[in-house]
């Protein structure tokens, strides 16, 4: 018994480390910069103002992957965050220059309160990638980061721009039930979103799009049953979108068939033929005695 306790005690540090790793993995910061490595092969998600036509994304050299951003002359590239984002770390990027580069670059960070911060001139290493870190005020929200180059003869290369934000939780799961799939025009359908859930938080918004046009026509802050009545026949796609306390979303859809009022439901031809044959047989049996007698004699 004592040896078993010693064994369990010896495993305790490993269990603590494993638990810490799981927690850190679950709470890993999110990346706020989109296309920070320029691996789209272009400036997707970036804005730019070039004074040199040879500036842009290139595969001449890269810190990682295939592409980097080449800047020459007086050029600006920037990424805007709308809405403004909260941060948990500093802005980092990798840069290098070719031997003929004679000037520097700087970074500008703009906050939602209208203030900004300039790094001052930085002259990176020649043909040697180096990582550069720029302090971010994590008590404020960032609206824009900008990279600026000044008059120079050579080229500056930038890659792997990164800015961390708060960890993102798991997204919610949207689900709903309804009282009917097919109804005549003017008949209300009741929808119930209470099967929706959020694995690590709460759902704060339920939105309904009744006709699949992308516009959400009705919303509630709780999983309340809602009813909707279609005024014209047709096939409609109903979409429920739920948003959780982290701002993450999910959608669920269903199709509703609305028939004209007073229309007799369509019956398959095979069903009609089978019913007609049965009616004829029954009429013949009861209306023709001789036929009925033959059936008794010759079953």
Image: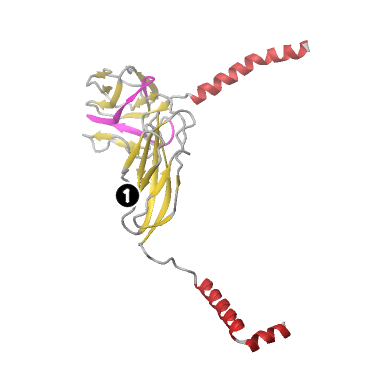
Q: Secondary structure at mark 1?
A: loop
Q: What color scheme is it?
A: secondary structure
Q: Is residue 273 above or below residue 55?
A: below
Q: Residue furthest bottom?
A: 290
Point out residue 30 in the picture as x, y percentages from the top left corner: 42, 27
Is residue 98 in the magenta section?
Answer: no
Q: Is residue 12 above or below residue 255?
A: above
Mark 1, residues whose alpha carbon is within 10 Å: few (<14), some, or many (≥20)? Answer: few
- Residue 104: tell me if it is visible: no
How many callouts does the rendering have? 1
Quadrant position of residue 90: top left
Query: Label 1 belongs to which residue?
Result: 213
Dominant secondary structure (helix, strand or loop) of the stretch shown in magenta? strand
The C terminus: image quadrant: bottom right
Residue at 24% from the left image edge and 27% from the top image edge: 152
Magenta stretch bounds: 64-92
Which of 183 and 146 lies nearest the eye of the viewer?
Answer: 183
Which of 211 and 281 lies nearest the eye of the viewer?
Answer: 281
Residue at 45% from the left image edge and 35% from the top image edge: 172
Residue at 37% from the left image edge and 54% from the top image edge: 187
Which of 148 and 34 lies nearest the eye of the viewer?
Answer: 34
Is residue 85 in the magenta section?
Answer: yes
Q: Is residue 171 above or below residue 118?
A: below
Quadrant position of residue 54: top left
- Residue 71: tell me if it is visible: yes
Point out residue 87 in the picture as x, y percentages from the top left corner: 36, 22
Point out residue 47 in the picture as x, y percentages from the top left corner: 27, 35
Task: Answer with left or right where residue 160 lies relative to residue 115.
Answer: right
């Amino acid at each position: 018994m004592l040896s078993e306790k010693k064994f369990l005690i010896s495993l305790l540090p490993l269990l603590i480390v494993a638990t810490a790793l799981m927690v850190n993995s679950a709470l890993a910061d999110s990346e706020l910069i989109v296309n920070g490595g320029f691996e789209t092969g272009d400036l997707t998600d970036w804005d730019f103002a070039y004074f040199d036509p040879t500036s842009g994304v290139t595969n001449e050299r890269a810190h990682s992957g295939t592409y980097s951003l080449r800047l020459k002359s007086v050029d600006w590239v920037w990424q805007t965050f709308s809405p403004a984002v909260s941060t948990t770390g500093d802005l980092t990027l990798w840069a290098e220059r070719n031997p003929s580069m004679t000037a520097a670059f700087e970074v500008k960070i703009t906050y939602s309160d209208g203030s900004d911060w300039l790094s001052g001139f930085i002259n990176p290493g020649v043909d040697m990638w180096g990582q550069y870190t720029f302090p971010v005020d994590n008590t404020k929200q960032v609206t824009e980061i900008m990279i600026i180059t000044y008059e120079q003869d050579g080229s500056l290369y930038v890659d792997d721009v990164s800015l961390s934000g708060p960890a993102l939780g798991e997204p919610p799961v949207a689900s709903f039930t309804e009282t009917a799939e097919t109804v005549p025009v003017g008949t209300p359908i009741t929808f119930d979103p209470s099967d929706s859930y959020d694995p690590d938080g709460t759902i704060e918004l339920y939105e309904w799009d009744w006709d699949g046009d992308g516009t959400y026509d009705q919303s509630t802050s709780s999983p309340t049953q809602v009813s909707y009545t279609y005024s014209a026949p047709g096939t409609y796609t109903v979409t429920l979108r739920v948003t959780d306390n982290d701002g993450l979303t999910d959608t669920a859809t269903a199709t509703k068939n609305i028939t004209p009022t007073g229309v007799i439901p369509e019956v398959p031809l095979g069903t009609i033929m089978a019913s007609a044959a049965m009616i004829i047989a029954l009429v013949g049996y009861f209306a023709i005695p001789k036929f009925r007698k033959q059936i008794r004699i010759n079953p």
